[in-house]
Every structure is written in structure tokens, then in C-alpha cells.
Image (cartoon, rainbow, N blue to C red):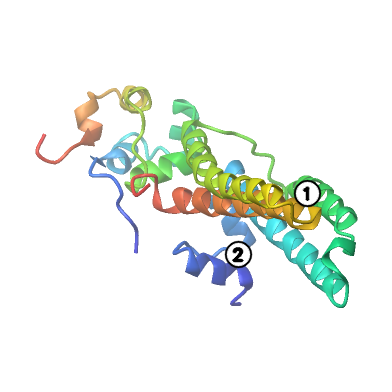
């Protein structure tokens, strides 16, 4: 059972696979965070700061709302 | 194997920790450090408590020699935390010491949780001083405040690492 403390959802996992099956470790290194933080974001256990969210979107070369979604938004 | 670590993990509603390779892969440097701090703080406190309880038997409180064990407990806590960190790195080959934004947020949350037992301990010690009780009670009220603060802070950080900060 995994707790979902945030309503923010994301497509990081799908985006990683679409980008040559990028590993969590690769993404973490490019964003400048630990792999555990990428795991926590993917699983919805942690909401990144706006700056970190933009960095993640930049790595994939897509707009922010293609990575993160908020229900009703 | 159902170890003490697994039992603790279950109580805290987090994933079992008995597999060291799991801890190396799934835990960051700071989370691992929090586990070490928690276990060392709990272990040293149990050691101190049993020593003091034995010394209290048949002795007037004012005559119980608590100073030596208390100083040793504080020193052992600091040294043991460092040594366990080093041993863990040697045995698992982990050299990761990275800390990021999430670690800092979790740490701040842990500090906030840990502040309250410290306030209660200090308030208790102040009350005991006003009531002019023995140094034994005053010193131990402060010491227990520190220990409970450390334990509460560690537990809060570990839950935040596993369940996120949204519930906090």
C-alpha cells in the first residue's frame, strides 16, 4: 500500500521510457537530485519545487504540463 | 527473517529494512543516516536507563551517580553514530553522500517535530529547579528531553521519507 499525499500526478516514468529508457539515476543526475527523490516524485510521494519541476521538463524537452498534471486544472 | 528492523518498519508502515542491499539501493545517504541515529540513540538510552535503574536500587536519589553514565552516553552516541556510518560504507561499498532539496525539507520537518520534546524537557527541568529538587531529576529531565527529541525527530523523518511530506 502506497500513500499518495499529493494530488499532483506525473508522467515521468512514461517520459523516461520514451527517451531511450532513461534510468532514474540518469534523470536524477541531470536534475541534480538523488535517485530516491526521483522515485518519490514518480510514486506521488513528493511534490517537487517549481524550479525542480521545470528542470525535469527541460530534461525531456517538453512543457511543464506534459510532465505534471493537477486534477481540475 | 523477521528482525527488529522489520518490526520497526511495520510499526512505522514502511517497507521492511532487513535486506541491507535494499537499504543501499532504495535509501539515500540522509535517510540511512537517520536510521543510524535512531538505532544508536535508542540503544544508548536503553543502556543508560538500565544502568541508572540498577544504581537507584537501595540508594537515595541524591547519592545516585548519574554524571559519569550520562556523559558516557552522550559521547558514545556521537562516536557510535560516526563509527556505524563508516562501517556501513565499508561493508556495503556505498560512497554516496548526496543531499538534495527533499532531504532538507524532510530534515526541517524532523527538526520541528523534535523541538517539542525538547521544550517539554526544558520546561520540566525549569519546574524541577523551581521546586528545588535534586540535581538527579533536573539533569535527567533535560537528558530525556534530548533523547525523546532525537527519537521523535528521527521517526518523523523516516515516515516523511517513506510516506512523503503531504500528510505532515
Q: Are marks 2 and 1 in contact (CB under 8 Å)?
A: no
Disc 2 is placed on an element classified as loop
Identity of the residue drawn at 68% across and 55% down: B144
Q: Which of B13/A19 is in front? A: B13
Question: Given the image, what chain letter belongs to the residue carrying mark 2?
Answer: B
Horizontally, residue B163 falls left or right of residue B70, namely left
Quick check: do tags 2 and 1 share a chain? yes
Q: Which of B159/B99 is in front? A: B159
Identity of the residue drawn at 45% across and 53% down: B162
Identity of the residue drawn at 78% across and 49% down: B90
Horizontally, residue A70 falls left or right of residue A30, namely left
Q: Is residue B32 at all visible to an observer of this figure? A: no
Give percent across and percent down for residue B99: 57, 33
* Numbered tag placed on residue B19 in the rendering: 2
| Label 2: few (<14), some (14–19) or many (≥20) C-alpha neighbours in 10 Å | few
Q: Which of B153/B165 is in front? A: B153
Quadrant of image for the N terminus of chain B: bottom right
Give percent across and percent down for residue A15: 29, 37
* Numbered tag placed on residue A16 in the rendering: none
Residue named by callout 1: B90
| Label 1: few (<14), some (14–19) or many (≥20) C-alpha neighbours in 10 Å | few
Amino acid at each position: 500500500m502506497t500513500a499518495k499525499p499529493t494530488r499532483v500526478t506525473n508522467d515521468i516514468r512514461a517520459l523516461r521510457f520514451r527517451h531511450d529508457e532513461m534510468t532514474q539515476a540518469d534523470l536524477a543526475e541531470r536534475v541534480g537530485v538523488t535517485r530516491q527523490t526521483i522515485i518519490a516524485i514518480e510514486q506521488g510521494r513528493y511534490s517537487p519545487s517549481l524550479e525542480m519541476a521545470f528542470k525535469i521538463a527541460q530534461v525531456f524537452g517538453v512543457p511543464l504540463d506534459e510532465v505534471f498534471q493537477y486534477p481540475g486544472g | 527473517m523477521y528482525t527488529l528492523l522489520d518490526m520497526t518498519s511495520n510499526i512505522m508502515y514502511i517497507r521492511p529494512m532487513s535486506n541491507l542491499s535494499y537499504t543501499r539501493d532504495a535509501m539515500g545517504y540522509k535517510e540511512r543516516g537517520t536510521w543510524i541515529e535512531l538505532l544508536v540513540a535508542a540503544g544508548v538510552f536503553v543502556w543508560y536507563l538500565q544502568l541508572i535503574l540498577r544504581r537507584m536500587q537501595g540508594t537515595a536519589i541524591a547519592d545516585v551517580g548519574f554524571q559519569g553514565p550520562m556523559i558516557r552516553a552522550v559521547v558514545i552516541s556521537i562516536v557510535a553514530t560516526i563509527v556505524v556510518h563508516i562501517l556501513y560504507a565499508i561493508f556495503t561499498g556505498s560512497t554516496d553522500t548526496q543531499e538534495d532539496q527533499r532531504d532538507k525539507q524532510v530534515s526541517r520537518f524532523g527538526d520541528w517535530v523534535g523541538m517539542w520534546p525538547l521544550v517539554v524537557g526544558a520546561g520540566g527541568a525549569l519546574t524541577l529547579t523551581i521546586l528545588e529538587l535534586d540535581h538527579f531529576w533536573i539533569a535527567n529531565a533535560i537528558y530525556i528531553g534530548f533523547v525523546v527529541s532525537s527519537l521523535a525527530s528521527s521517526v518523523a523523518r523516516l515516515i516523511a521519507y517513506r510516506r512523503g511530506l503531504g500528510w505532515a
